[in-house]
Amino acid sequence: MLCLVLSAVHGAEPRDGIRVAVNIFMIARRFEDLEAWQLANEVKQRVYALLDISKARKDRKFCEQITESAASAPANLSEGFGYYRHPEFARHTRVAKSSLMETQNHLADGVDRKYWMRAQARPIHELADRAIGKCVRLLAHLETTDAPGTTNPRKKRTGTTFPKRKA
């Protein structure tokens, strides 16, 4: 399976003191190649590690909620990638993005419940922000393109997540 994924990388030479983002296409041959999946999986692993050292272990329901939301993001990205077709992949990417946001909510809730300190949750929250950003960029690509070899010339794809603004 092959998936072309639009990615932004920072240009090597700054212009007017600002690094310019350059769009390039990356080929993802496996779901593990997706930057969104890599970051979401790291969020999941860090949540598991935080739970292992926290008082939250005693709250079974809370642990189930945060582990399910953390595990959902990389699982949905891998499942969506497996469908190959962009509309199905986009639907699963939206679920993954929402699961990352839910995980951020549970991290804040853990602070409120005094299971961990805000400083312990902050790096995971920021990592989830990066994963959400990668999901948003992946969605923009998936909603406006067709998977290689599946182009339908009669139907022009337009994104639904990012509608065009009227002038």
Image (tube, helix red, strand yellow):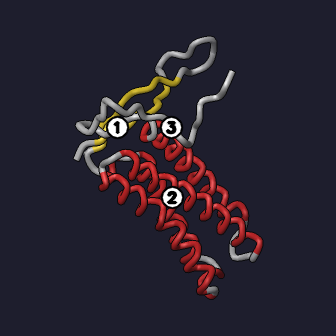
10 Å neighbourhood of mark 1: few (<14), some, or many (≥20)?
some
Whole-angstrom CA distance, mark 3 to mark 2, is 16 Å
Q: Which residue is mark 2?
A: 95
53 vs 28: above or below: below
> Residue drawn at (55%, 62%), measured in percent from left and top?
99
The label nearer to you, 3 versus 2, is: 3
5 vs 121: above or below: above
Q: Which residue is mark 1?
A: 146
Residue type at the position of mark 1? Asp
Whole-angstrom CA distance, mark 1 to mark 3, is 11 Å
| Residue 59 image position (x, y, % from top left) | 64, 86
| Residue 66 image position (x, y, % from top left) | 58, 72
Of marks 1 and 2, which one's residue comes earlier in the chain?
Answer: 2
The answer to which quarter of the image holds residue 2 is top left
Tell which of 115 and 159 is nearer to you: 159
Query: Judging from the image, what secondary structure is the residue with disc 3 in?
Result: loop
The answer to whether the residues at label 1 and label 2 have Cβ atoms under 8 Å apart is no
| Residue 154 image position (x, y, % from top left) | 33, 31
Seen from this angle, which residue lies furthest top? 16
Q: Which residue is mark 3?
A: 159
From the viewer's perspective, is 123 left or right of 75?
A: right
> Residue drawn at (30%, 41%), measured in percent from left and top?
3
Seen from this angle, which residue lies furthest right? 112
Whole-angstrom CA distance, mark 1 to mark 2, is 20 Å
